[in-house]
Amino acid sequence: MSWWFKAELWKRVMIGLVAGLVVGLSIRLGMGLESASEFTTNWIKPWGDAFVRLIRMLIVPLIAATLIAGIVSMGDASTLRKVGVRAFGLYGLTTLGAIILGLSAALIFNPGIGVEFPELTESVAQDVETRLDAAASASASLTDRLLAIIPSNPIAAMVSGDILGVIFFSIMFGIGILFAGEQGKAIGKAIDSASSSLISLTDKIMDLAPFGVFALMVWVASTQDYELMLSFVKLTLVLYGVCLIQILIVYPTILIVFGRESPARFFRGMSSAMAIAYSTASSAATLPATIESLVKNLGVKRSNATGVAAIGSTINMDGAAIYLSLVCIFALQASGQPVTMNTVMTIAVLATLGSVGAAGIPNGGLFMSAALLTALGFSAEQVIFFVAILFPFDRVLDMMRTLTNVTGDATVATCVDRSLTRQDSVHTQTNEGTA
């Protein structure tokens, strides 16, 4: 098996992904949809879930330790400010591009016109209503979400997995260490040691990625109701097409213009993280792989990779922005409602805010779409209906929008790092010339 571990991780992940699809389809053909779904859900999917849990186990401590260590290594708060301004500016640019692409595609291809929906059973409607109630109770208003960035209890934020709260506290704590001067060096070194240990553990866990991806893809391929999916082929194709434009045209353009980075080198370096994103459908679960790919394959400074990618995994959801734009237009067209310019502008604003609020977890965008449909005037019954129809095959859509999200995070992190490197180089040359 030595050849297996000598192969690059992305190649092993892709082998696991393709093998999972083949095995999952074979199980489905041999056992039938119902039996295959029960078998893979009970006996194969848990192995994939275990891998995702191992990754999620690392997210909070890895972000906290590496972000604090990275800030301390910057030497001053002005460098941190430069990172933040660049990151938020580029994230805003990618989100704007995603919204424009999503709305344009929806208005050109009209995915909701001519769609015939099957009747919902009572049990399905009740199940979705329960899920929506749970999602609504867990969600907060935009103002509350902004205030929640500042955690009243940092330990509780870490326990609950509040990534934005963890990021905010880690930044503040790192700045505090810088201001403490000599007295802060001891704890700075201890945190740097903890960061190195967590990175080593991440490397070992990532060796399990091909097996976790295999298990998840077997489950996906054997459980999806393809007959129902056929009625939504147009929506699926439009989403995939728009996301591919975002990934293959928008991001490379940003890489060339702002990062002066070769898109080919970028995609080679990020291929394993992108494969994990597609298979797990979770930006948060992919975060450790994203950071490691940026640092090891693209040479991004760890502090920049951790800070920018971590922020992006919670606020930069370009795939979700595209998805929400499409779903809103889809729902309006399918229900026979007119799509006016005022409606389009409203959807643009809602999709932007909704993409920021969408959780980086599987199906997070689906339940955020419920809030947007409600804001557009759909009744509770109509919202339940649309979510119930979309839910059985949302995994297929979620995988692509997560791939888009993660690629966008990596694009911005790379551009920010390259920009700061160029700036430092100019300052060095200026100082040498002056001397």
Image (spheres, rainbow, N blue to C red):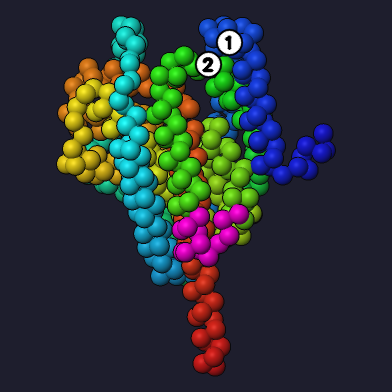
Residue 162 in the image: state x and y as whole percent: 39, 40
Q: Quadrant of the C terminus?
A: bottom right
Q: Can residue 209 be seen in this view?
A: yes
Above-or-below relation of 20 to 282: above
> Residue 292 — which label?
none
User: Magenta residues, as a range?
Assistant: 252-264
Based on the displayed image, in which of its 4 quarters is residue 77 positioned? bottom left
Nearer-the-camera pick, 133 or 114: 114
- The residue labelled by disc 2 is 223
Q: Main secondary structure of the magenta part?
A: helix
Q: What residue type is labelled 1?
A: Ala
Residue 417 in the image: state x and y as whole percent: 51, 63
Above-or-below relation of 75 to 192: below
Q: Is residue 373 left or right of residue 45?
A: left
CA gap, disc 2 and disc 1: 7 Å
Based on the displayed image, in which of its 4 quarters is residue 159 positioned? top left
Is residue 259 one of those drawn in magenta? Answer: yes
